[in-house]
Amino acid sequence: MIRTAKYFFMAMAALLLAAPVYAQDAAAASSKGALYLAAGLGMALAAGLCGIGQGKATASAAEALARNPGARPGIFTFLILGLAFIESLALFTFVIIFIKVQ
């Protein structure tokens, strides 16, 4: 998994660093097409990773409740707090992207 992620990020870095090579002039560079593409990719990445985080948090809470049902109030409180923090990351990303695209 880590090896695959390393190669993926190396390939993405090579692709993103190669983009200025194809710039022809100032008019082509001022195009907002790349901005919209980056905004979409950024929001997709943020939403996907927040979804993974929420899934892991929920799975851990369910496992903790299965092991110790008497600790439900404490687990539930921290689960809701953690899910709110995770979801706020996606919302902050959405707001930042919305401001940048405007």
Image (cartoon, rainbow, N blue to C red):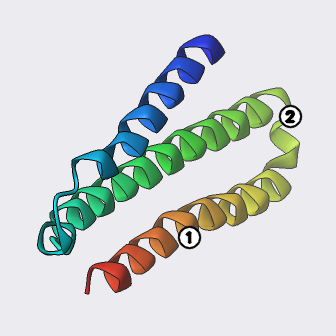
Viewer-nearest residue: 86 or 15: 15
Residue 84, horizontal then vertical, whole percent: 61, 67
Residue 27, horizontal then vertical, whole percent: 12, 74
Q: Earlier in the sequence, mark 2 or mark 1?
A: 2
Q: Which residue corresponds to the image point at 48% horizontal and 37% vertical from the top-left?
A: 13
Q: Which residue corresponds to the image point at 46% horizontal and 72% vertical from the top-left?
A: 91
Q: Quadrant of residue 35?
A: bottom left
76 is higher (above) or lower (below) than 59: below
Classify residue 49 as left or right of residue 76: left
Real-space CA distance between mark 2 and mark 1, rounded to the nearest whole angstrom: 29 Å
User: Which residue type does callout 1 highlight?
Assistant: Ser
Viewer-nearest residue: 102 or 46: 102
Q: Which residue corresponds to the image point at 71% horizontal and 40% vertical from the top-left?
A: 61
Residue 83, horizontal then vertical, whole percent: 62, 59
Q: Which quarter of the rendered picture does the N terminus lie within?
A: top right
Q: Which quarter of the rendered picture does the C terminus lie within?
A: bottom left
The local crowd at label 2, few if under 14, some if 14 to 19, many if 20 or more residues have their Cα within 10 Å, is few
Classify residue 11 as left or right of residue 100: right
Q: Which residue is mark 1?
A: 88
Residue 69, horizontal then vertical, whole percent: 81, 38
Viewer-nearest residue: 61 or 1: 1
Viewer-nearest residue: 9 or 60: 9
Classify residue 26 as left or right of residue 88: left
User: Which residue type does callout 2 highlight?
Assistant: Asn
Q: Which residue is mark 2?
A: 68
* Contact (Cβ within 8 Å) of mark 2 with mark 1: no
The count of marks equals 2
Q: Nearer the viewer, mark 2 or mark 1?
A: 1
Q: Which residue corresponds to the image point at 52% horizontal and 18% vertical from the top-left?
A: 7
Q: Name the secondary structure under disc 2.
A: loop
